[in-house]
Amino acid sequence: MKIRSVNAYQVYDSRGTPTVEAEIELEGGERGHGMVPSGASTGQFEALELRDADPSRFRGKSVFKAIANIYCEIAPALVGWDVRDQSGLDRKLIELDGTPTKSRLGANAILAVSMAAAATAALAQRRPLYDCLGQGRGTLLPLPEIQIVGGGAHAHWRTDVQDFLLVATGAKSFQEVMEITFNVHRAAGDLMAKRGTLYGVADEGGYWPEFSTNEAVLQFMTDAILYAGYTPGRDAAISLDIAASDLYDPQTQRYSFRLEDRSFTSAQFADLQIGWCERYPIVSIEDPMADTDWDGWSAIASALRHRIQLIGDDLFTTNLERIRTGIERNVANAVLIKLNQIGTVTETLAAIDMTQQAGWNPVVSARSGETEDGFISHLAVATNAGQLKVGSFVRGERMSKWNEVLRIERDLGPNARFIGSSILERIAKSGAQGPIELPLEP
Ligand code: PGA
Ligand code: ZN
């Protein structure tokens, strides 16, 4: 299963922004593809995507240099390589680039090829991608976190909190998650139309509403669950992505809510969220604190880690060293997993593995600039990650991920497992323990 050629071209993500697609062709003629997403509220510790920065073309966003790097440097190094050797191939890509942030060849160039290799290997072995990636061990269908209201950098700061998400905690199957989500999503739309507060649609497809405070959205989410005929906290609950790095000023060490013209010290910001958890059915918070505010993370973790899921996204950026530090300092109990934050499939699998070894939850995630590629649905099942976050319950680039899970469910047949929200309860219980010792090498 040797690689005959590696090709690449510019395609467009869900925001219509250029991105890289790579195609790998094997000597036997099989061809697989990999397409790279892109964030808007990116973390400062992420691998770097290479953009041309030529203002006369695509407002500087074209990716022709990354594509040239695939043709000129990556392809010659990979021709003849056995595509099944994903870890060797990824190591080669990392070596070729030679920088810690993959900035020379571009994390977008590297990841497109890495994903294309995984897809092609599965195709050539006539195995579904989840089965191949997970070496036959993946059987767990993920519990989705689905955006109802989008804010922050994805909706011109209409709200400061970036994501107000729904978790169908009462669902007994993945299909029931889809039904509960459909009902609450539609109920939320009806309620906004009734109240005249709908403003538009955010980057990940969530409603972009008119609210006067961030907390008002929590009440609205609770109302929408009730309006759809469900019991908040039992059938469906709230998950938040505060994306707090975007609200933090490292100079003043304060967090700001522009909508409410308020600012908070780190301790006040933690208290605010602890109060929300007492008043609303919140089961998970992502990035409650900024990616440099480790003390803030420690403070909120000691108050909430034993009650809810606390996910680090910008804090960890799917980076093994940062995840290791977080586990040692016990500042969270879950890690958001984004392929393009780190840049290769192998490193992403290692990040998931380290997270699971610590007894924490990996949450596989899309980006705000997404593609129609269903790779992450396969990644979530392959690794038994247990959770998947891809944005809202509308728009093709989001629905393609949920639909892919439904296809995987059919493919797994009686082997498919769904444990729903017990994955959240398990983590909250384990959070009561002290710091976890990790083996030195992943
Ligand atoms: P991003 O947002 O893709 O714009 O970074 C998603 C998230 O913060 O989880
Ligand atoms: Zn996030």
Image (cartoon, grey):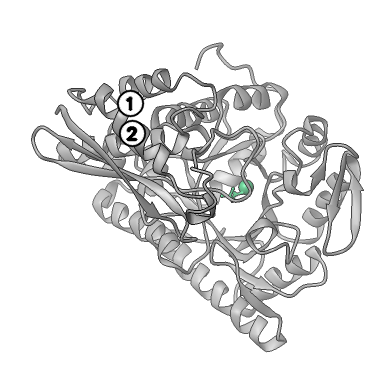
The residues bearing labels 1 and 2 have C-alpha atoms spaced at a distance of 6 Å
Instruction: Identify the residue under disc 2.
Output: 70
**Residue pictured at 74% horizontal, 46% vertical:** 244
Indicate the quadrant containing the N terminus: top left, top right, bottom left or bottom right.
top left
Instruction: Identify the residue under disc 1.
Output: 73
Residue positioned most to the top? 440
Residue positioned most to the left? 28
Q: Which secondary structure lies at badge 1?
A: helix
> Above or below — where is 405 with respect to 94?
below
**Residue pictured at 45% horizontal, 27% vertical:** 347
**Residue pictured at 88% horizontal, 37% vertical:** 251
Q: Which secondary structure lies at badge 2?
A: helix
User: Residue 400's x, y, as percent?
Assistant: 37, 60
Question: Which of the numbered marks, if any, corresponds to residue 57?
Answer: none
Are circles 1 and 2 on residues that touch, CB within 8 Å? yes
In this image, 20 relative to 329: left or right? left
| Most foreground residue, 232 or 269 | 269
User: Residue 42's x, y, as percent?
Assistant: 61, 44
> Above or below — where is 158 with respect to 143?
below
Type of the residue with mark 2: Ile
Type of the residue with mark 1: Glu
Which corner quadrant of the image does residue 349 belong to? top left
User: Residue 193's x, y, as percent?
Assistant: 64, 86
